[in-house]
Image (cartoon, rainbow, N blue to C red):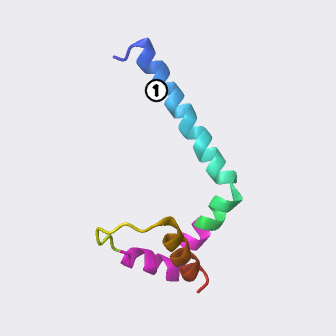
Amino acid sequence: MHGAAETARIRQDVAAARDVARSALTNERFRLMLEQIVTPALSDVLIQMKNDGSQTDLRTAQQSYSDVSST
């Protein structure tokens, strides 16, 4: 059985998760991102992406994303 502090923490975590989910559902940018992800052509590209162990800087990643999303 959980103690009062643990129960309170769990309730706070659940409330925070609900707030994040609600925010995501009403966020236009998030909705647009989901639409792009479920686009078959982009989904194929995402599936084929592999981590070769090297790191990519933010500017390169943004450029790659814009190249893919413009097709």
Q: Residue at x 37, y 17 (%)?
A: 2
Label 1: state its secondary structure.
helix
Q: Is residue 64 above or below residue 23?
A: below
The image quadrant that residue 55 belongs to is bottom left
In the rendered image, residue 18, in percent from the top left (x then y), is placed at 58, 39
Q: Which residues are magenta?
A: 34-49
Amino acid beneath label 1: Ile
Q: Is residue 30 magenta?
A: no
Q: Is residue 55 above or below residue 20?
A: below
**Left or right: 6 in relation to 63:** left
Q: Is residue 53 above or below residue 48?
A: above
Q: Residue at x 58, y 77 (%)?
A: 66
- Magenta stretch, overall SS: helix
Q: Residue at x 29, y 72 (%)?
A: 52
Q: Is residue 30 above or below residue 45?
A: above
**Left or right: 8 in relation to 53:** right
The image quadrant that residue 49 belongs to is bottom left
How crowded is the residue under tag 1: few (<14 C-alpha within 10 Å), some, or many (20+)? few
For label 1, the residue is 10
**Image quadrant occupied by the N terminus:** top left
In the rendered image, residue 28, in percent from the top left (x then y), is placed at 70, 59
In the rendered image, residue 64, in percent from the top left (x then y), is placed at 51, 77
Q: Residue at x 53, y 70 (%)?
A: 59
**Image quadrant occupied by the C terminus:** bottom right
In the rendered image, residue 14, in percent from the top left (x then y), is placed at 52, 33
Q: Is residue 36 magenta?
A: yes
**Left or right: 5 in relation to 17:** left
